[in-house]
Amino acid sequence: MALRTKLALPTAVLIQFLIGGCDVSGLAPGLTGDSNPLLPGSAEPSIVVSPGDQNIDDQDYALLYATTANLPEASTDNDGIHGAARIRWTIVSGTGGLNLVDPSSTATLNNASTIDTDPATDFGGSVLYFPDLGSSGEVVVKAEVIRPTNRTVINEFGEPVQEQEDIVIATAQAVIHVNDELRLKLTPPVTVLPSGGTVSLEAVLEALSGTSGQDDLNLRYEWNMTGLAGAGDLQSTADSKTAVFTAFSEAATFTVTVKAIEVLEDGTERVNGPASATVKVDPRLRTVNTFGYYLSRDESTDPAYYSVVARVFIPKVQGAISYRIVGQGMHDSAYYGTGWSWSFAGDPPTGSIPIMEEGGGYSFGLSLAGGSIASGGLAGAYGWMDSRFSGMRVIVTATVAD
């Protein structure tokens, strides 16, 4: 029987001055009026969803992020009473469910085939997709900008009545591939930075088992960035799985992409990816909202023993004076339930549980399972961690110094 020990002992994990110092109302103050990098100079309402194509397994989730431009405000005219524009997300092909991104809730979220978000609110341009367990294939998610409208019409009795119609003014879609043999992720998938803000991005190559074989492979990386010239900078090298993005002083939206090229034993190459991430620069902010991820790994240095640790990984945000992390969608009957939150202060960050620096980011442990290799419990240790934490979405809020 594997020895199971909990690393995290958070009894009062929320540090009140951190919450008080984090203006969540200003995290992502709407995308109306933002320029659309794919439609330069266009005055028509538009929406672009990124990543447009990504790979996940059936125990993972996908995050989709919509950038909108030129959305009309609420108004009244001869055509009716128009409400503020919203984004309607719909699974038009494939199975699974959609969820809102809620940075304040650790409650269980409910899957839906259609869901609306408000682009003028925190994370209103984002949605989470969860595949059905055991599913595979291609999933298509459509994003429509709708304008809720009430019109006065005369019914069959000659009476004026209100009719409601959601007028579609822009549309886009994204494709999600479930259960490829190998998959490449670029994390964090979405980050919103203030002027001068810096975030590290990491390319993560995972196998279907949920264990990472990236460190054992012969890999090189191809990094690329598109967006407003002169509004941001990406520093990367072909031998590194991490790259650093630095925001300048202009409002802009960037797409960062990476490929992991694996050199096989026979000398041939296999290309994994591309994977993409969105970085939005908002000069008004003094907070950074971004995302982390969960991964379990064997951290034993003794070849006769294993020590599988479930970890949360978060990106490093330069100048951060505090981090608040919310884990949603766990299914951990052993300890955490369906969600939990953690807080860390300082640079480097410290809190009620140990946090360690790892390359371009930080990590902290959730749980561990250990034993002898001879016992045959290694696969079960990974399975136990994944049964509790796989599919968890990790939402990070960092407060940065002025």
Image (spheres, rainbow, N blue to C red):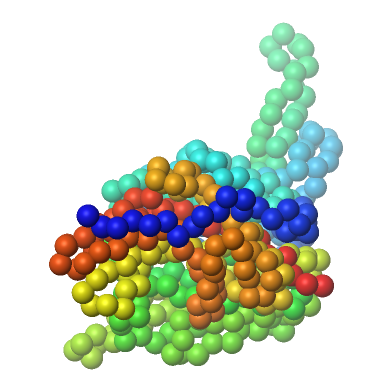
The residue at 59%/56% (across/down) is 342
Q: Position of residue 108 (x, y in %)?
A: 51, 40
**In which quadrant of the rendered view does residue 24 lie?**
bottom right
Seen from this angle, which residue lies furthest top? 157
Report whether 141 appears left or right of 250.
Answer: left
Quarter of the image that includes the N terminus: bottom left
The residue at 45%/90% (across/down) is 238
- Count of picture labels: 0
Quarter of the image that includes the C terminus: bottom right
Q: Position of residue 332 (x, y in %)?
A: 41, 46
Q: Nearer the viewer, residue 8 or 122?
A: 8
Q: Is residue 66 above or below residue 228?
A: above
In the rendered image, is residue 85 in sight? yes
Report whether 166 appears left or right of 354.
Answer: right
Q: Nearer the viewer, residue 316 or 309?
A: 309
Q: Nearer the viewer, residue 21 or 262?
A: 21
Report whether 287 appears left or right of 303.
Answer: right
Q: Position of residue 295 (x, y in %)?
A: 41, 64
Q: Is residue 379 above or below residue 255?
A: above
The residue at 67%/75% (across/down) is 347
**In which quadrant of the rendered view does residue 21 lie?**
bottom right
In the rendered image, is residue 36 in sight? no
**In which quadrant of the rendered view does residue 320 lie?**
bottom right
Q: Position of residue 204 (x, y in %)?
A: 42, 72
The residue at 74%/22% (across/down) is 162
